[in-house]
Amino acid sequence: MKKRSTLVYLILVILIIILLLANLMTGSSDISVSLLTDIVLSHSRQDALGVIIWDIRIPRLIEAAFLGGALALSGYLLQSFFANPIAGPYVLGISSGAKLLVAILMVFSYKFFFSMSSLMMVIASFVGSCIAALLVIIVAKKVRNMAVLIVCGVMIGYVCSAATELIVAFADDSNIVNLHNWSMGSFGAASWSNVKIIIPVVVIGMLASFVLSKGISVYMFGEAYASSVGMNIKLFRLMLILVSSLLSAIVTAFAGPISFVGIAVPHLIRSVTKTSDVKTMIGASFLGGAAACLLCDLLARCMFAPMELSVSTITAVFGAPIVIVMLLKRKRDQ
């Protein structure tokens, strides 16, 4: 089993390296390997290609990798929390809650002429994620059927999305395009200033996940067992939701809501590794999410170039069938 997990890690790392190179070399201007090597080694920004590589493509691929990993890891934590493989930040409405708060902040910043910093976006997104997660937890205490919980999460997401669309509809004409593009999910606004915030936040979220890994292993046997071995259930659940909300929030703040990655990637990783070891799943889910978003971003940019699709369009095309198969398999096993 350990050899299998190691092999999966190795394959994911190789896949990420290949996708990093593909993202750097392809786009509106295709760049050869030799030219790319010269630009990267010389750190040159003296011509248009140097600017494209250093100021557009490298920040974008870093953002896609880290945010994709954060999204998949957030999905795994939520699935562990609710003991349901269909749970995820997008399905449970947590991403939509973050989207709503960020959209409100955007509109207020345009209307009252104050500069909206990246930190403000992260905080607004985190607050929105926590509010949506709290609503889902309240519902979870009222219902025992996980299918009903998922439906309630979807409904919370629809309400938040509808509120966001109303905000976009009544925004000033000059702001509608920015709000609409962001709300569709994209890594197109990547920049070095964003990367400097994304990396520390995601690293903190990942380290916190590893710290919680032992508790997650115990919690997966049920709350009764966890209580019997002395775990503080309330504190653990709070920490797990906060970490998951933070990871989901950083994604929504900088890339908008991205669908299905948080559900499909942990499921695929679990199916391939065939392990329930939490630390293995945390690392592999992060790498899987990074690879998935790098691939989807590459397809979004190149499939209908020069027109660029939203990343959520691509993730939905690949992720939705995986979720359907997962549901059918789960029903058959029952």
Image (tube, rainbow, N blue to C red):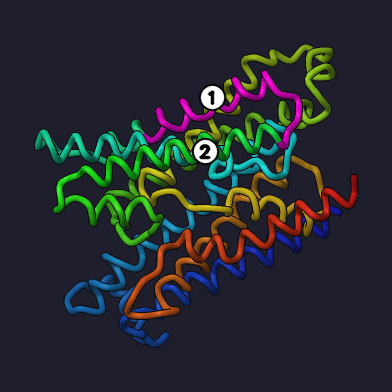
Residue 79 image-quadrant placement: top right
Quadrant of the image containing the N terminus: bottom right
Instruction: Note whether 327 is above or below 311 in the view shown.
Output: above
Residue 165 forms part of the magenta stretch: no
Tell me the magenta residue range.
Answer: 125-147
Q: Which three-letter amino acid code belongs to the residue tagged 1? A: Leu
- Residue 262 visible to an observer of this rendering: yes
Quadrant of the image containing the C terminus: top right
- Residue 37 visible to an observer of this rendering: no
Question: Answer yes or no: do the residues labelled 1 and 2 have beta carbons within 8 Å?
Answer: yes
Q: Is residue 227 left or right of residue 27?
A: right
Residue that appears at 75% across and 25% down: 144
- In this view of the protein, which residue sits in the foreground, 121 or 142? 142
Q: Residue furthest right?
A: 333
Residue 131 forms part of the magenta stretch: yes
Disc number at residue 109? Answer: none
Instruction: Note whether 164 is above or below 333 in the view shown.
Output: above
Task: Report which residue position mark 2 lands on.
Answer: 93
Q: Is residue 94 left or right of residue 55?
A: right
Residue that appears at 41% across and 31% down: 128
Residue 37 image-quadrant placement: bottom left
Task: Report which residue position mark 1 lands on.
Answer: 135
